[in-house]
Amino acid sequence: MCSEIFRFLLGRFAWLALCCLLPCGVHAEEMVVCEKNWYRNASLGCSSCPAYSTSPVNSNSNMDCVCDAGFGKGDYGLCYLIQMEICEPVVSVTCSGTCECIPIVSALHGTISDGPTNYPNSADCQWIFTAGKVVNLQFTMMETEEDRDYLTVEMCTDAGCAVKVQLHRTSGFIDGRSSVYSNNPASYPFLRVGFTSDTIGTRGGFKANWWSSSPTVDFCDCPASTYLHNFACQNCPPKSISAVGSTASTDCVCDANWYRSSSIACSSCPPNSTSPVASTSDMDCVCDKCTSTTGDGQCMRPDVIMSCDSTTL
């Protein structure tokens, strides 16, 4: 009877005993210090970070697990292989005139400006963006003489802007960011920004951000043994391979002596049997010579193996 009462009290007031053992102001969860690549879970224990991720010592949740380079965080905090060679549209920028001019051979985004100081009088500057894709431009700062010094944005059919459509022309001052101006790559694959000033008076000038995009995202081929899914290259299941450029999990085929047992897994053939690459059922597993098939699909060698030629077991 006394032992039962003791167990009851221990179960009811164990939390109180734990609290009494802790220093003042210290919570129980603070006493658990997890190792590197582990994190403290809701049960005050330590759980391992997902594959392809790391965390520092004393991490408090799986949010502290950071995916390795080349991996992104997906559902349930798991890390998946990011497609390393996404064929995003690159842009080249040429420029001319008396403003700051920094040509760009190939980039996905950047910034243009008339320069770090006030622009000069009689400025006549231009920036030509070449991509064959959509180029977006947004002014983040503009301070020019109103109705005297102008910024112009045009989309053009060629680098010389022989045929062009004006998207925007402005002067004066903007507070904050402007609208986004974009070309139509199907008909106007070039975007031009022009800036002119008169002979009297200057101001701070302008700055603009630009970036490239595409109406349809272009991807390079995923490497062998991976497939494209959710804009990333996912690894094929263990014991399976796929060709370069695969776009679905069904493109992953099981290795020799393995067969597809579900939509996402390959299972080994029974002992003493083999199967060809890309087998889709255990029926593709063929018993070796000198074995016999049992009712459950297993391949069994007889107790006494005879000469083992083409006519006998």
Image (cartoon, rainbow, N blue to C red):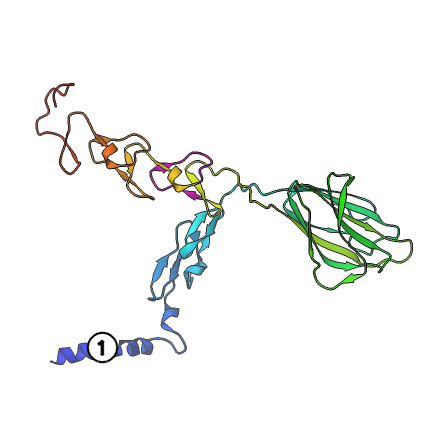
Using the rendered image of the protein, determine whether residue 37 is visible from the camera's viewpoint: no
Would residue 238 be counted in the magenta stretch? yes
Q: Look at the picture and state if 255 lies above or below 172.
A: above
Q: Secondary structure at mark 1?
A: helix
Residue lying at 44% horizontally and 60% vertically, measured from the top left: 63
Residue lying at 77% horizontally and 56% vertically, measured from the top left: 206
Q: Nearer the viewer, residue 116 or 243?
A: 243
Q: Position of residue 66 (x, y in %)?
A: 46, 55
Q: Nearer the viewer, residue 249 or 310?
A: 249
Would residue 106 be counted in the magenta stretch? no
**Which residue of the protein is positioned furthest toward the right in this rendering?**
200
Residue lying at 41% horizontally and 42% vertically, measured from the top left: 235
Q: Position of residue 253 (x, y in %)?
A: 35, 36
Amino acid on which the number 1 mark rests in the picture:
Leu
Q: What is the span of residues highlighted in magenta in the rendered image?
A: 234-247
Q: Which residue is mark 1?
A: 10
